[in-house]
Image: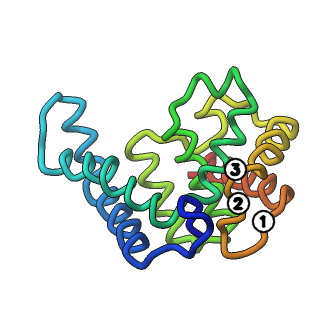
Amino acid sequence: KNIVSGGYRGTVVGATIAETCYKELLKNGLKALQAAKRHVVTAALENIIEVNTLMSGLGVENNGVAGSHSICEGISILTEQDKKTFHGEKVGFGVLCQLMVENALKELLDEVYGFCIDVGLPVTLEDIYIENTAENIRAIAKHSMKSYWDAEPFLVNEEDVFAAIAAADEMGRWY
């Protein structure tokens, strides 16, 4: 559901924008990162700037957010660790957790974990300065339930999120 407009369904255009954002990130993300490191502007960098500003803004306004942002919100309960990472890094790890909750196919996991590793996004709890303990994972899972999990097309509970965080972290270690 679209949380911005009060619970209406997401739009077709918003879903198309989200899909285009994903494709552009995969196509241009690493090239844009390399250009930015050299302080040069390339077509790839311009495309990623567009994805990050215009497209993602339109996407969230037309479709809202879900589990990935819930994980980001959950991490905020661990205040010391929360201060050490950027919003996008926490949401990036949240994407991996959301994929676990959604039982994503291995091919999609390969693609997303591979992209994250290529561009230096976190794939483990350690990457976001969180000790992998049941207490920390439980705190994140519990706090994340106050956020956007209800945007998923099925019921998600705290145990699902706890398991997803642990599985996403383990999968990140494997990759």
- Considering depth in this image, is 21 or 27 the residue closer to the camera? 21
Label 3: which secondary element = helix
Which of the 4 image quadrants contains residue 9? bottom right
Q: On the rendered structure, is 16 left or right of 44?
A: right
Identify residue type, mark 2. Trp
Identify residue type, mark 1. Val
Q: Earlier in the sequence, mark 2 or mark 3?
A: 2
| Residue corresponding to mark 3 | 170
Q: Position of residue 135 (x, y in %)?
A: 87, 36
Q: What mark, if any, has residue 156 been given in the picture?
A: 1
**Eyeballing the image, is 136 above or below 159?**
above
- Considering depth in this image, is 113 or 75 the residue closer to the camera? 75
| Residue corresponding to mark 2 | 149
Which of the 4 image quadrants contains residue 56? bottom left
The mark lying in front, picked from 2 and 3, is 2
Q: Position of residue 27 (x, y in %)?
A: 27, 60
* Colour pattern of the rendering: rainbow
**Eyeballing the image, is 104 above or below 78?**
below
Q: Position of residue 52 (x, y in %)?
A: 34, 48
Evaluate if marks 2 and 3 touch, with contact meaning CB atoms under 8 Å apart: no
